[in-house]
Amino acid sequence: MGLTSQKGIRRIVKADWNGQELFFKPGNRNFLSGNINLGTDDYSMKGGPYTRAVYAGDSGINAASPFDITGTNVFDIELSIQGGKSLRMLPIGETTQASVRSDWPAPSFQGGFLPVSQNLGENGFDAEWEISYLSRSIPLVWVSGGDNEAGGISFQRELFGVDFFKPLDHYALNERAVKYAILFLIIPFLTLFFLEVFSRRSIHPAQYLLSGLANIIFYLLLLSISEHIAFSFAYLIAACAITGMMMLYARSLLETWARSAYMGLVMSLLYLILYLTLNAEDWALLIGSIAAFVICAVVMFLTRKLDWKSLNIKTDK
């Protein structure tokens, strides 16, 4: 059995061949002859390039199997492993049945065959595969160095298994937050613009620039604080700090707490929407698109009576 690393093997729970118990030893005996370089995608065997079928070298475990050349061979093994980023299996039996149970909450099934059944939950997952030899291109029997190998059988596309997908950590959440930065820079600018128009007070472009700089600092605060405490608390601290600063700045520009409260309300709603979007892996696109639609509708409603030539609000007569 070829492994990229055998350090993750905790114990062999069960291993038998045709009802006889197998005793494994460290090291890997290649079932394909030739020189296979571990860690490369191709190897040369008897003068030709072939897709890597198994991991070779000393990394792995092996056992002498009582192979019955006249009848059916049934192989059953149950391993308890830990660590690792992925698990791959190669279906070389007439019927290959595999079952994986793990406490990892975020699996990503990969390879040429998907599970016939799967059960996902917060505490882990169960998955089962059942693969017939008719659904793959690997023959039931081949001779090392024979015509089958000379034809260059591709074992790589027949591999199946699971990647242990890493859930969103604080770095991934920060990266996703930056992707929405443009939208969350435009909205505060629009809010200041509307407050300027409705209050009939002039706001200098430098003051718009400072408000944009404050919103950029939010992402720096979020990243630096989330490296020391939980992301949710870091997000709350950064959002409250920037919202409070923008409210005070709007108060100094507009000279009324009522109008500055609008800025605080807009910033609070924006950060709430952003937080929900970051944590909704499956609904992020839907939440983002609905938020963009609502924002566009609000802007259109507020500017329906705006005279863009003179930037004055038209009144109904």
Image: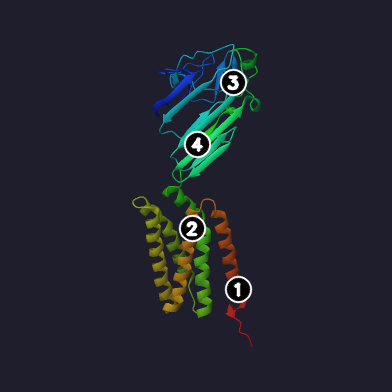
Measured as percent of width and height from the top left, residue 315 is found at 61, 84
**Precedes in sequence: disc 4 or disc 1:** 4
Q: Secondary structure at mark 3?
A: strand
Which three-letter amino acid code belongs to the residue tagged 3?
Tyr
Q: Residue at x 41, y 71 (%)?
A: 247
Q: Mark 1 and mark 4 in contact (Cβ < 8 Å)? A: no
Circle nearer the viewer, 2 or 3: 2
Measured as percent of width and height from the top left, residue 246 is found at 42, 68
Which three-letter amino acid code belongs to the residue tagged 1?
Phe
Label 3: how many Cα within 10 Å (few below 14, some 14–19, many 20+) = many
Residue annotated with mark 4: 163
Which three-letter amino acid code belongs to the residue tagged 2?
Leu
Label 2: how many Cα within 10 Å (few below 14, some 14–19, many 20+) = some
Q: Secondary structure at mark 4?
A: strand
Residue annotated with mark 2: 276
- Dot label at residue 61: none
Label 1: how many Cα within 10 Å (few below 14, some 14–19, many 20+) = few
CA distance for labels 1 and 2: 25 Å
Circle nearer the viewer, 4 or 1: 4
Residue annotated with mark 1: 301
Q: Is residue 4 above or below residue 272?
A: above
Which quadrant of the view contains residue 298?
bottom right
Depth check: give the residue in front, 40 or 288.
Answer: 288
Circle nearer the viewer, 1 or 2: 2
**Precedes in sequence: disc 1 or disc 2:** 2
Residue annotated with mark 3: 50
**Precedes in sequence: disc 2 or disc 3:** 3
Q: Secondary structure at mark 1?
A: helix
Q: Is residue 97 visible?
A: yes
Which three-letter amino acid code belongs to the residue tagged 4?
Asp
Q: Quadrant of the C terminus?
A: bottom right
Measured as percent of width and height from the top left, residue 249 is found at 41, 71
